[in-house]
Image: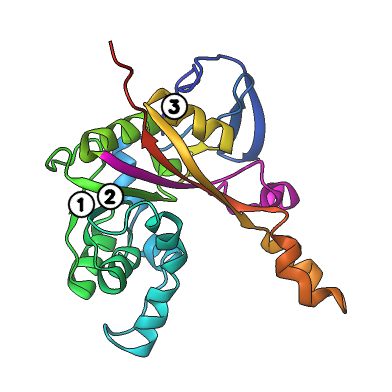
């Protein structure tokens, strides 16, 4: 294990407040800006060992044989993600950082005609994506992969940024890989959301030691702004906790999903564009 930086990577603050203790892991928030972080945390050498077969089988849902009805149903679960940004980029190349088994990329390619490529630190997950789904995947950490610059129209990070040792480095890498008019899509757990507040100590979004950082919409937007991005679209998922509670109430149960949309869910997603540079 290693210690997290003593100064906040977002605002530089040195004061911290404890959020959750799950020994030997402690999760703090910066007292100035609210960015959450794990301290201590796994070392760089430990990371590849974390994302093994057991982790992948626990986190990722498989989808049957390619072309089967089960496979098509599995791909359909990814359509809400594509719809989130498709109005801004209806064609082109997509890079999914932290692609896991690759079903999002498979949906983009098969159902919408995008060209796709993935990156993942887990060789186990990448092997599944390549051998099972026929995808192009690079194994490694985002800071060390070698891909052509300014090649992609869309870069997505679905529940990836919280896993990184340096979120700023990951976003700046996206700057190098995106075309000038490209878009960046990020989805992260939101520790200020209803799901987190109602399930605090047992909230799945903490997930130590895999999650190094913990975001809110404000800290995510702040980090993106520092890296030259402007958020152009955002999405709060509905609260599953509220929905399940309402489903137990007669008469109200039929409106459970609709009411649950009024409460923030497990994560928040944004689409961001690079800020236009002012004329000299």
Mark closer to the chain start, 3 or 2: 2
Q: Quadrant of residue 59?
A: bottom left
Residue under the point 34% across and 43% down: 183
Residue 87 picture location, percent across and down: 40, 56
Real-space Cα separation, disc 1 to disc 3, in angstroms: 28 Å
Question: Colour scheme in the image?
Answer: rainbow
Choose between 14 and 3: the one closer to the eye: 14
Choose between 20 and 254: the one closer to the eye: 254
Residue 102 picture location, percent across and down: 30, 64
Choose between 213 and 242: the one closer to the eye: 242
**Residue closest to the far right:** 250
Residue 39 picture location, percent across and down: 51, 31
Mark closer to the chain start, 1 or 3: 1
Above-or-below relation of 217 to 201 = above
**Residue closest to the far bottom:** 69
Residue under the point 47% across and 65% down: 80
Residue under the point 41% across and 40% down: 272
> Is disc 2 surrounded by few (<14), some (14 to 19) or many (20+) residues within 10 Å?
many
- The residue at which mark 2 appears reads as 121
Residue 208: tell me if it is visible. no
> Is disc 1 surrounded by few (<14), some (14 to 19) or many (20+) residues within 10 Å?
some
Real-space Cα separation, disc 3 to disc 2, in angstroms: 26 Å
- Tell me the tag on residue 139: 1
- Tell me the tag on residue 191: none
Does residue 12 appear to the left or right of 106 in the view shown?
A: right
Which of the two marks, 1 or 3, is nearer to us in this view?
3
Q: Are marks 2 and 1 in contact (CB under 8 Å)?
A: yes
Asked which secondary structure carries label 3, the reply is helix
First to last magenta residue range: 181-207
Mark closer to the chain start, 2 or 1: 2
Residue under the point 22% across and 55% down: 92
> Is disc 3 surrounded by few (<14), some (14 to 19) or many (20+) residues within 10 Å?
some
């Amino acid at each position: 294990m290693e210690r997290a930086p003593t100064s906040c990577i977002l605002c530089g603050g040195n004061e911290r407040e404890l959020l959750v203790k799950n020994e030997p892991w402690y999760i703090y928030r910066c007292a100035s800006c609210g960015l959450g972080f794990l301290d201590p945390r796994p070392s760089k050498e430990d990371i590849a060992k974390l994302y093994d077969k057991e982790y992948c089988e626990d986190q990722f849902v498989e989808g049957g044989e390619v072309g089967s009805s089960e496979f098509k149903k599995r791909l359909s679960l990814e359509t809400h993600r594509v719809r989130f940004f498709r109005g801004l980029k209806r064609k082109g190349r997509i890079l999914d950082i932290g692609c896991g088994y690759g079903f999002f990329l498979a949906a983009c390619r098969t159902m919408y005609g995008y060209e796709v490529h993935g990156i993942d630190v887990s060789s186990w997950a990448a092997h599944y994506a390549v051998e099972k789904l026929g995808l192009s995947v690079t194994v490694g950490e985002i800071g060390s992969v070698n891909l052509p610059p300014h090649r992609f129209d869309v870069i997505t990070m679905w529940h990836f940024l919280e896993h990184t040792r340096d979120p700023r480095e990951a976003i700046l890498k996206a700057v190098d890989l995106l075309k000038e008019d490209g878009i960046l899509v990020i989805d992260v757990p939101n520790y200020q959301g209803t799901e987190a507040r109602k399930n605090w100590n047992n909230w799945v979004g903490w997930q130590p030691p895999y999650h190094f950082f913990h975001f809110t919409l404000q800290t995510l937007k702040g980090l993106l702004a520092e890296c030259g991005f402007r958020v152009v679209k955002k999405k709060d998922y509905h609260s599953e906790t509220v929905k399940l509670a309402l489903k137990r109430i007669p008469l109200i149960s039929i409106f459970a999903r609709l009411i649950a949309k009024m409460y923030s869910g497990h994560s928040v997603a944004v689409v961001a564009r690079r800020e236009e540079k002012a004329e000299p």
